[in-house]
Amino acid sequence: MRKLIQFLKEAHLELRKVSWPSRKELIGSTTLVIVVSILAGLFLGILDILFSRSILWLIKLIGS
């Protein structure tokens, strides 16, 4: 039980040292993460479509 209490005290002290972002910084960072995630998803989706169609085209070409 002593170790747990000591751990919690030390964790509390460490959390007081943390530099927390402002609301404006938090909203900006969150927006950036969402936008980049959407763009990456669109890019990967387009690549998937292109590769899938290319493979199907190759299969049809070889099968003919």
Image (tube, helix red, strand yellow):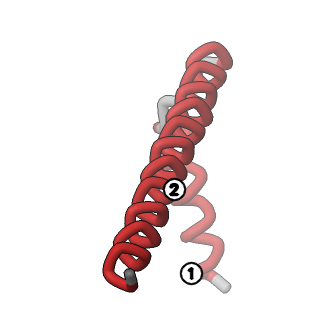
Question: How far across and down, in percent of the image, does residue 9 sit?
Answer: 59, 59
Residue 25 vertical placement versus 56 (above, below): above
Q: Position of residue 28 (x, y in %)?
A: 58, 19
Distance between the alpha carbons at the discs numbered 2 and 1: 56 Å
Q: Is residue 58 above or below residue 10?
A: below
Kind of residue indicated by mark 1: Lys
Label 1 crowd (10 A; few <14 / some 14-19 / many >=20): few
- Left or right of 64? Residue 27 is right
Q: Is residue 39 above or below residue 50?
A: above
For disc 2, the marked residue is 49
Give amino acid for label 2.
Ile
Marks 1 and 2: in contact by CB < 8 Å?
no
Residue 20 seen:
no
Q: Which of these two is toward me, 16 or 2? A: 16
User: Which residue has dot 1 on it?
Assistant: 3
Tell me the residue at 43%/52% (across/down). 47
**Foreground: 6 or 60?**
60
